[in-house]
Structures are given as structure tokens and as C-alpha cells.
Image (cartoon, grey):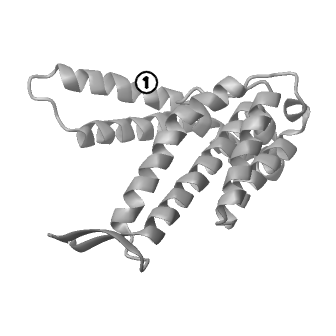
Amino acid sequence: HGALGVRYERRASPLHAARAVVGASWALALATTALLYTHPLVAATVIAIAVAAGVLARVGGRVALMLWFAVPFALLIALVNPFVSRDGLTVIWRFGEIPPFGELDITLEAVIYGALLGARALALLLSTAVMSATVDPDGLLRVFRRVSFRSALTAALGVRLVPVLGRDARRLDEARRCRAEPPGRVAVARAVASGALDRAADVAAT
């Protein structure tokens, strides 16, 4: 979410004023509800609650930013599921034999379930976006510190290194494109991973 710009910023709202554990628990309860129940009304209710909470907490712009990512992602799930699912009896389209997939039929049940999966994914992403925008990450780290100082330190370092690794990936990708015969993205990912391990070792030593 940090890469998408959905970051915590202090606002005058009940969610911001609540303790970090309380705010995170509320948002995670929304996300868990979307995961546990398959009824479309539940997913729609979670989406509406997440959007309303974002607007009332004065982070509607940040939640809308997540929508730019979440809606295409949900549509992709809804479109792909009918092609990969073999469940359902009500065939609405026959593509025939398509090597190497075999007989490909689109069923009404797969279309409906794909739309439901997309709605649940949207509800999950919006719930976590509200949590990222309204829950103080330092407050959550203080909770981990009570359990284990080492866990809190690891979580803090992991959170702080994410933007650094993102900048490394962008610089490596720009360098890759400047070469006459640019290497593949796998090479860039390998270089970023190696840099992450080196940074982690240096930070741990410090």
C-alpha cells in the first residue's frame, strides 16, 4: 500500500484517535468477513463500509487511490475465473477443443463465482487500505515490542526498507533499458533480491 500512496497520515477522526490495536482489529474484522462469507450482499456491505469509513475518517482520497488498483484487479479475477474453472453445469459458451487446455466451456456458475471472487478481493483490498491510512504503524510496532523486542525491530526494519528497495528496482530497471541488449526482468529481480540481502546484513550488523 505504501507503493500506491496509501500511507498513514494523522487526521481528526475516531479511527485515528482509537488505539492502533483497536483500529487494526476493526479493519481486519472487515477483511475477515469478506473472506469468510461468499454471499454477494456481504461483500457489497464490506465495500460500502470501507468506503464510508474512509470518507468519514477524511482519507477518502487515499481509499480512492486504492480503487484505481483494486477495481481492475477485481475485474481481472472476474474475467479469468470462467476460463480456468471447470465447475458448473449451465454452459453459456462453447469454445470447443483448444490445445493444450482441452475442451473449453464457459459456465454460468463460473461467471457468477468469478464476479463474487472479484468483489471479495475488492472488499479485502479496501479494508486493508483503510487500515493503512488510519492506523498508526508505530503504534502497532509498540504492541509487538511488548511481546518481543526482536520482532518489533524486524518489523520496523522491514517496513522502512520497502521504499528503499522500490527505488533500487526502479534504478536497476532504468539501467536495464539503457543497455543495447537489456537483460530480462528476472535479472532485475535477482539483483534487487541480492541488494535486499546485502542491506539486511548491513543493517543487522549496525
Task: Report whether residue 168 is seen.
Answer: yes
Which residue is drawn at the image coordinates 48% and 61% (left, top)? 114
Which residue is drawn at the image coordinates 82% and 48% (left, top)? 26
Task: Please name the amino acid that badge 1 sits on.
Answer: Arg
In the image: residue 89, left or right of residue 116:
left
Which residue, given by chain and number where applicable, does mark 1 sit on? 167
Q: Position of residue 42 (x, y in %)?
A: 72, 58
Task: Using the rendered view, name the quadrant where residue 20 is placed.
Answer: top right
Residue closest to the eye, 16 or 56: 56
Which residue is drawn at the image coordinates 44% and 77% (left, top)? 88
Q: Position of residue 199 (x, y in %)?
A: 46, 34
Residue closest to the eye, 110 or 161: 110
Task: Report whether residue 206 is seen.
Answer: no
Total marks shown come to: 1
Residue closest to the eye, 110 or 173: 110
Where's the N terminus, which quadrant?
top right
Task: Using the rendered view, name the quadrant where residue 15 is placed.
Answer: top right
Task: Using the rendered view, name the quadrant where residue 196 is placed.
Answer: top left
Residue closest to the eye, 131 or 82: 82
Circle 1 sits in a helix, a strand or a loop, which is it? helix
Mark 1 is surrounded, within 10 Å at the Cα level, by few (under 14), some (14 to 19) or many (20 or more) other residues, namely few
Q: Position of residue 168 (x, y in %)?
A: 39, 26
Which residue is drawn at the image coordinates 45% and 54% (left, top)? 77
